[in-house]
Image: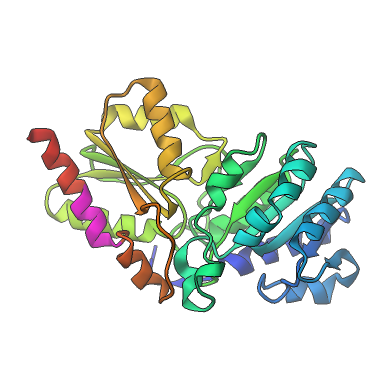
């Protein structure tokens, strides 16, 4: 696939919700003044009677959606990730988590890319950690727009609450169109060897794939793993891949505390793997404003830094 092709995870999610709603009259869209941000204008024009606008009131949106779910509807709430997971955290926990209602949350601006247009307040770098701690909450971080579409349909079929993290709306196409998406099963995207296994989530996988190409030219083979379903985690799959690798790396556009790196560390600790883990991501710091790819570079998630991290980790095994 051409990783230089850019599309929108936001549009992919919104279009999938509309497609589902055209087939199922129970599917509804709940907005917190987010129709345009969510790229849901087609939904609004096509099914205006099934779009419920709450205004700038995320807590109300989640509570309303929970009420709809309790009546047999299938609501999606789609707005900025940090507002869903922080401003409406109590409602997410008590009205969707504790009740195990089928409210599907879709969070925009996952990671640092939101800093390009809206700054630090709209960068969501804690959302995965927050939601991982809510019992029964399922979490998917798609790699690209095509996978986002498939994840949206997959999440709709799940019985309880769920969260899909999407980006700023300008994401690389990384997966083949006919590539299946299997909920709660990891996906090996590239395997050139077992010197290291690199687990990653979201669009930053493009940099991991580029790092794999760089390393292959230097005779270092790695396994690149898309761990798109963060919860429930494919723990058995993670353990199997760790067992065959010399060292383990995680890459996430999120704080390294509580997200992907923590999830993999938990599996490694409980399995007694004895392998070394290096976590790349935001090192317990806030984001900053700036262009998205430049921010990934700034926070140590460029292809070059990922490749150098793998080499350092392997060199440390010989020292």
Q: Name the residue rendered at 67%, 46% in the picture.
A: 162
Say if 270 sits above or below 58 in the image.
above
Q: Tally the marks.
A: 0
Q: Where is residue 135 in the image (x, y as percent from the top left)?
A: 66, 34
Please identify the dominant SS of the magenta region: helix
User: Which quadrant of the structure image shows residue 264?
Assistant: top left
Q: Give the range drawn in magenta.
A: 302-309
Query: What colour scheme was applied to this rendering of the protein?
Result: rainbow
Q: Which of 8 and 287 is in front in this view?
A: 287
Whether residue 126 can be seen here = yes
Q: Where is residue 203 in the image (x, y as percent from the top left)?
A: 44, 60
**Left or right of residue 1: residue 163:** right
Q: Name the residue rendered at 52%, 42% in the picture.
A: 230
Q: Which of 198 and 47 is in front in this view?
A: 198
User: Which quadrant of the structure image shows residue 282?
Assistant: bottom left
**Left or right of residue 17: residue 46:** right
Q: Position of residue 289 (x, y in %)?
A: 44, 74
Quick one: quadrant of the C terminus? top left
Whether residue 150 can be seen here = no
- Residue found at the far left of this picture: 319
Q: Name the residue rendered at 83%, 73% in the picture.
A: 46
Q: Nearer the viewer, residue 2 or 134?
A: 134
**Left or right of residue 222: residue 66:** right
Say if 280 sits above or below 173 in the image.
above
User: Which quadrant of the structure image shows residue 148?
Assistant: bottom right
Q: Where is residue 130 in the image (x, y as percent from the top left)?
A: 58, 46
Q: Does the magenta stretch include residue 130?
A: no
Q: Nearer the viewer, residue 133 or 10?
A: 133
């Amino acid at each position: 696939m051409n990783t230089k092709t850019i599309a929108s995870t936001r549009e992919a999610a919104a279009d999938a919700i509309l497609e589902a709603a055209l087939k199922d009259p129970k599917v509804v869209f709940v907005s917190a003044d987010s129709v345009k941000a969510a790229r849901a204008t087609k939904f609004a024009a096509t099914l205006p009677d099934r779009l419920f606008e709450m205004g700038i009131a995320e807590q109300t949106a989640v509570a309303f959606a929970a009420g709809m779910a309790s009546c047999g509807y299938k609501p999606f709430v789609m707005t900025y990730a940090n507002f869903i997971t922080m401003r409406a955290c109590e409602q997410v926990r008590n009205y969707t988590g504790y009740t195990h209602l089928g409210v599907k949350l879709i969070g925009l601006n996952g990671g640092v890319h939101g800093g390009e247009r809206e700054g630090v307040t709209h960068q969501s770098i804690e959302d995965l950690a927050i939601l991982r701690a809510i019992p029964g909450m399922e979490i998917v971080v798609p790699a690209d727009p095509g996978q986002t579409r498939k994840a949206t349909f997959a999440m709709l079929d799940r019985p309880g609450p769920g969260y899909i993290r999407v980006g700023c709306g300008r994401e690389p196409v990384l997966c083949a169109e006919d590539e299946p998406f299997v909920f709660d099963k990891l996906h090996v995207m590239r395997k050139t060897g077992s010197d290291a296994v690199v687990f990653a989530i979201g669009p930053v996988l493009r940099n991991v794939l580029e790092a794999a190409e760089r390393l292959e030219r230097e005779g270092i083979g790695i396994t690149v793993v898309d761990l798109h379903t963060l919860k429930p985690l494919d723990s058995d799959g993670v353990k199997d891949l760790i067992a065959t690798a010399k060292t383990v790396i995680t890459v996430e556009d999120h704080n390294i505390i509580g997200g992907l790196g923590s999830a993999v560390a938990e599996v490694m600790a409980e399995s007694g793997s004895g392998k070394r883990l290096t976590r790349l991501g935001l090192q317990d710091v806030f984001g900053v404003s700036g262009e998205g790819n430049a921010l990934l570079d700034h926070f140590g998630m460029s292809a070059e830094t990922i490749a150098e991290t793998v080499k350092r980790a392997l060199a440390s095994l010989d020292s």
